Amino acid sequence: MSAENSNKRPANGLPEGQPVAKKLRGLPETYVLPPNVIVMRETMQTRGMFTIIRDEKTTHQDFVFYFDRLSRLLIEEALSYLPAEEVDVMTPTGEAYPGIRWTRNLCGVPIIRAGEAFEIALRGILRDCVIGKILIQRDEETTLPKLFYSKLPKDISERTVLLLDPMLATGGSAKAAIQVLIDSGVAEDSIMFINLVSCPEGLQAIYEAYPKVCVVTGEVDRQLNERAYIMPGLGDAGDRYMGTE
């Protein structure tokens, strides 16, 4: 793929196809991201912070601090792909500035409990952002994700939804949460699922079930192990953030 083609984006803001970046470490060179996936641009700063939050020796205080910093960068990245329209504004000098504005209001929806770790970053960027909540847990008898609670704004069908969860493993909880949003009237292509760490299995599961949902992820790890843990991963993000390890 040429540099020119890699910068082209269709109307919905998603890339036409991404070459495998060097940061997909441990994955085969032939691995291709699903077309609905955007991986956060890597810098020495982001890789350094991922190193800190992945380190088992990192203290709780440092984990929270660098998780919050990475979350903010990740959400900022995601906002770059929202649909927008051109609009002119008048500057104090009397000259017009050709700018843009989002075409829809936003709503953040963390998947409880780990997804709530994104709220500080979200409110730091979008101070007036409406926030809903979805609680999904695995049914011990069926092993399937089960909806226990949801609280969403009445006008959520008119908003672009930022669905928030730090880790994308099997994709079971994410798919269940996406279906809750769709059942509430949200269009599939108005949902953006944001997570810090994902894996090929989870990304493929989301794409096969909901190909119009945009997934924005910080890094893509190698695989799931036999216990459905992301490898190399970073442990239980919710427990490490909340201090309940």
Image (cartoon, grey):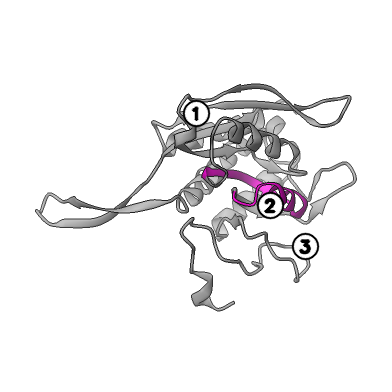
What residue is shown with label 2? Answer: 207
| SS under mark 2 | helix
Q: Is residue 83 left or right of residue 193?
A: left
Task: Give the mark nearer the N terminus: 3 vs 1.
Answer: 3
Q: Which segment did they paint magenta?
A: 190-212
Q: Between label 2 and label 3, give the one nearer the viewer.
A: 2
Residue 144 in the image, given as x and y percentages of width and height: 81, 32
Task: Give the mark nearer the N terminus: 1 vs 2.
Answer: 1
Q: Between label 3 and label 1, give the one nearer the viewer.
A: 1
User: Dot 1: few (<14), some (14–19), or many (≥20) neighbours within 10 Å?
Assistant: some
User: Dot 3: few (<14), some (14–19), or many (≥20) neighbours within 10 Å?
Assistant: few
- What residue is at 61 percent from the left and 32 percent from the top? 183
Compute the Cα span from label 2 to label 3: 21 Å
| Membership of 171 in magenta stretch | no
Task: Give above or below for 79 relative to 9.
Answer: above
Residue 56 in the image, given as x and y percentages of width and height: 75, 42
What residue is shown with label 1? Answer: 131
| SS under mark 3 | loop
Q: Is residue 106 left or right of residue 94?
A: right
What residue is shown with label 3? Answer: 26
Q: Quadrant of the N terminus?
A: bottom right
Check disc 3 and give the amino acid type.
Gly
Task: Give the mark nearer the N terminus: 2 vs 3.
Answer: 3
Q: CB of mark 3 within 8 Å of CB of mark 1? A: no
